[in-house]
Image: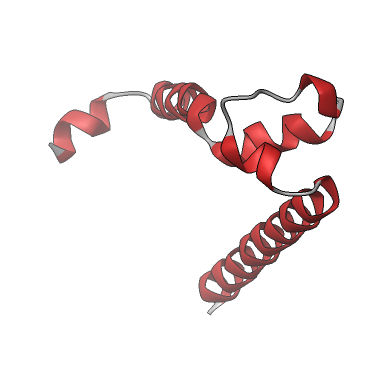
């Protein structure tokens, strides 16, 4: 498999993986919640249970904590990766 992948240009591989990542985002619940923050409460969908059972303040607080944790772990992994490369 290695020699076959070496024949494929790197830009093509990046394009394929970028397409796969963007195509899979439609099912990610975090992105759906971010959309709900900017949507008025009367337009929230009825079929989604966590929207109606939780107060809007608690919903936004949980989402902000989730985004802060994702940013922290991304920065942490990035810094550790740079540190590992410099050694």
Tell me residue 47's x, y (percent). 56, 25
Q: Is residue 8 left or right of residue 81?
A: left
> Is residue 77 visible to the viewer in this orientation of the structure?
yes
Count of numbered tags? 0
Asked which colour scheme the image uses, the reply is: secondary structure
Quadrant of residue 9 within the rendered picture: top left
Residue at the image position 42 percent from the left and 26 percent from the top: 20
Tell me residue 73's x, y (percent). 62, 65
Name of the residue lying farthest toward the front: 53
Q: Is residue 30 left or right of residue 60?
A: left
Tell me residue 27's x, y (percent). 49, 29
Q: Is residue 43 left or right of residue 87?
A: right
> Is residue 39 visible to the viewer in this orientation of the structure?
no
Tell me residue 1's x, y (percent). 12, 36
Name of the residue lying farthest toward the left: 1
Q: Is residue 59 left or right of residue 86?
A: right
Quadrant of residue 39 within the rendered picture: top right
Q: Nearer the viewer, residue 66 or 7?
A: 66
Residue at the image position 52 percent from the left and 74 percent from the top: 84
Residue at the image position 40 percent from the left and 23 percent from the top: 16
Residue at the image position 74 percent from the left and 25 percent from the top: 44
């Amino acid at each position: 498999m290695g020699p076959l992948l070496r024949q494929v240009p790197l830009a093509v591989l990046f394009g394929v993986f970028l397409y796969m990542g963007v195509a899979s985002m439609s099912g990610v619940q975090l992105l759906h919640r971010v959309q709900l923050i900017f949507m008025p409460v009367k337009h929230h969908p009825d079929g989604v249970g966590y929207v109606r059972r939780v107060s809007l303040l608690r919903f936004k607080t949980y989402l902000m904590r989730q985004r802060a944790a994702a940013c922290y772990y991304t920065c942490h992994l990035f810094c550790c990766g740079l540190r590992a490369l410099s050694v």
